[in-house]
């Protein structure tokens, strides 16, 4: 395993772009207003604090897959913790270019004090992309020179976004995966809030596919909608880069990690581990499975990558002594609304939940926006400030349930980012009432994946993980996904992780405002660049975190 102690080459911006960013950050004559506790420039590390008054965060939890060995660890093999691992201060996970300790990243009240050090020694480092900061017009002087500086910085930011765009068309490979998994997992919650991250799940299952062979791999590739691992790697790389943002305005970050059992040193396929590190940007950790300190390292990593939003769901995660490998994947999203709601307009009102009426705070806005409708729902889309991300809100018609919409192919397609011919859209004045919500859920994915045709990996008699190890009877023991989404007047914030242990409706009246009040269970999706859904969910109780 020594080869992984060297830094794994990650993602690098072109030197020309880096120089542009550095030059703009260091020019002394840029006519900006004085910064308020911020530093111009670009992030060397994705945990750099971001100064935002309001943010939107989507937390997705769904990247832990525990592979269990059928036979117990040899009693002659040590499972005790390395003394240095237990007692010595260990380095934080940092980019290849960063030598200083990573700063704490603790957004507002998600967590009061977060220690971003990982109490385990990573075997590699992963470098995240360099992005130019998104220019805030309010930071520039209100004259021609200030305007010119703002335009120049905006062009540099656009160049950095363009460098991340893969140009791939994701509709074909992902359409089947999105619709099948959404129908399967969103219907598991019944009358409860149910949230999941299609993108997070796709990334976790893509890593899992790399460790499999034979029919076990074929089942995963079929669900993921790709004929080969080579095409899957191209797709996952493109998705990772296209959806990455860390520019001071928006945070949209994916993170992967592998958790190895030190008792199995020499039994892992190093080529597979190298592929996971390089092509899936996965951190590699190694430690004594079954040791509480190693479990704490896993929980700390997940909490860091989701900014503490999912701590209630990570507290009981642990790795058994007979672990073969753990795969963890996380996603964190935070963004400001392009047009924030006025806090002074927020007022309590009644939400008709499945379990009974309840009082909750509703945000209100009256503005021009796109309004969409079909035979059984009405919808609006709210943009985030950076422009590449949006939230779709879908209210079922009276007498129609969220389950009815999920069973309707056109409604489901619209929720997941497409616009079928049966859905009509027009712009107009909309009076919108939307409850503030903080919703989360945890899903055990095993039964759902089996229903979707992925079954062999859960059976020690049929699972084929020979691409990872020759150790016998390796199979998936746990497959857990957790997610949380918070929406208020200023922002959306969300996070998720996955852990694998081994008749046509009439159009709205013309020239009259459209009134849309989401006061009963509704669907939402957060869409990223290229229309990829980062998060999808059902809100049955907006106050039920």
Image (cartoon, grey):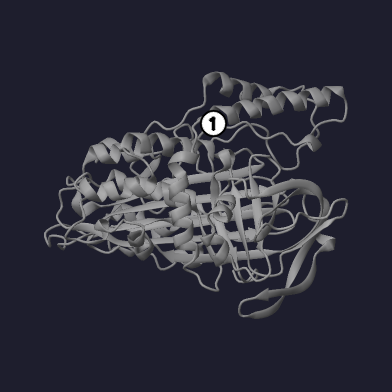
Question: Where does residue 457 sit, x and y in percent of width and height?
Answer: 26, 56
Q: Residue at x 64, y 31 (%)?
A: 41
Q: Nearer the viewer, residue 376 or 24?
A: 376
Task: Give the quadrant of the N terminus.
Answer: top left
Tell how many labels: 1
Q: As drawn, which residue projects farthest toward the bottom?
A: 356
Secondary element at image label 1? loop
Position of 260 with respect to 156 (left or right) is: left
| The quarter of the displayed image where residue 76 is located | bottom left
Task: Give the quadrant of the C terminus.
Answer: bottom right
| The quarter of the displayed image where residue 344 is located | bottom right
Q: Nearer the viewer, residue 484 or 84?
A: 484
Q: Residue at x 58, y 36 (%)?
A: 43
Report which residue position mark 1 lands on.
165
Position of 326 with respect to 406 (left or right) is: left
Question: Where does residue 27 sit, x and y in percent of width and height?
Answer: 71, 22
Are there few (<14), some (14-19), or many (20+) residues within 10 Å of tag 1? Answer: some
Residue 306 appears in the rendering: yes
Position of 33 with respect to 400 (left or right) is: right
81 versus 188 height, above or below: above
Residue 114 appears in the rendering: no
Q: Nearer the viewer, residue 420 or 526?
A: 420
Q: Nearer the viewer, residue 52 or 374?
A: 374
Question: Where does residue 433 sit, x and y in percent of width and height?
Answer: 77, 62
Question: Where does residue 504 sit, x and y in percent of width and height?
Answer: 67, 57
Q: As drawn, which residue projects farthest toward the front?
A: 503
64 versus 188 height, above or below: above
99 versus 493 height, above or below: above
């Amino acid at each position: 395993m020594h080869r992984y102690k060297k830094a794994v080459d990650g993602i690098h911006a072109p030197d020309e772009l880096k120089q542009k960013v550095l030059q703009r950050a260091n020019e002394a004559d840029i006519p900006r207003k004085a910064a308020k506790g911020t530093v111009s420039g670009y992030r060397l590390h994705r945990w750099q604090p971001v100064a935002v008054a309001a943010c939107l965060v989507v937390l997705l939890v769904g990247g832990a897959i525990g592979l269990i060995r059928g036979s117990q660890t040899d009693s002659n093999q040590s499972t005790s913790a390395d003394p240095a691992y237990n007692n010595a201060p260990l380095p934080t996970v940092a980019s290849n270019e960063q030598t200083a300790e990573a700063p704490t990243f603790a957004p507002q009240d998600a967590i009061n004090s977060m220690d971003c050090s990982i109490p385990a020694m990573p075997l590699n480092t992963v470098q995240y992309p360099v992005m130019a900061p998104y220019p805030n017009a309010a930071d520039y002087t209100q004259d021609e020179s200030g305007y010119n500086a703002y335009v120049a910085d905006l062009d540099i930011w656009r160049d950095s976004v363009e460098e991340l765009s893969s140009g791939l068309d994701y509709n074909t490979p992902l359409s089947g995966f999105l619709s099948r998994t959404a129908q399967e997992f969103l219907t598991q919650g019944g009358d409860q809030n149910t949230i999941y991250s299609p993108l997070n799940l796709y990334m976790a299952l893509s890593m899992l596919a790399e460790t499999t062979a034979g029919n076990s791999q074929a089942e995963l590739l079929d669900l993921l909608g790709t004929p080969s691992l080579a095409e899957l790697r191209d797709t996952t790389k493109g998705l990772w880069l296209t959806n990455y943002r860390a520019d001071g305005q928006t945070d949209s970050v994916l993170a992967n990690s592998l958790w190895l059992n030190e008792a199995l040193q020499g039994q892992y396929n190093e080529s597979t581990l190298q592929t996971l590190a390089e092509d899936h940007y996965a951190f590699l950790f190694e430690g004594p499975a079954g040791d509480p300190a190693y479990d704490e390292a896993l929980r700390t990593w997940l909490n860091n990558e989701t900014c503490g939003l999912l701590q209630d769901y990570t507290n009981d995660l642990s790795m058994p002594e007979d672990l073969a490998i753990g795969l963890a994947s996380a996603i964190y999203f935070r963004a400001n609304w392009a047009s924030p709601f006025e806090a002074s307009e927020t007022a309590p009102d009644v939400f008709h939940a499945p379990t009974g009426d309840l009082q909750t705070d509703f945000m209100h806005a009256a503005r021009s926006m796109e309004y969409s409708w079909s035979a059984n729902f009405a919808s609006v889309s709210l943009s985030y400030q950076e422009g590449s991300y949006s939230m779709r809100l879908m209210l079922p018609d009276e007498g129609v349930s969220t389950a009815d919409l999920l069973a309707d192919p056109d409604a489901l397609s619209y929720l997941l980012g497409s616009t079928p011919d049966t859905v009509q859209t027009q712009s107009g004045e909309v009076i919108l009432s939307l409850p503030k919500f903080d919703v989360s859920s945890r899903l055990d994915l095993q039964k759902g994946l089996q229903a979707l045709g992925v079954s062999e990996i859960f059976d020690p008699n049929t699972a084929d993980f020979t691409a990872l190890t020759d150790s016998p009877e390796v199979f998936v023991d746990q497959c857990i996904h957790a997610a949380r989404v918070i929406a208020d007047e200023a922002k959306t914030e969300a996070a998720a992780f996955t852990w694998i242990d081994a008749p046509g409706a009439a159009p709205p009246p013309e020239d009259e405002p459209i009134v849309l009040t989401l006061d009963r269970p509704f669907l939402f999706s957060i869409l990223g660049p290229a229309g990829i859904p980062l998060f999808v969910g059902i809100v049955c109780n907006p106050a039920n975190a």
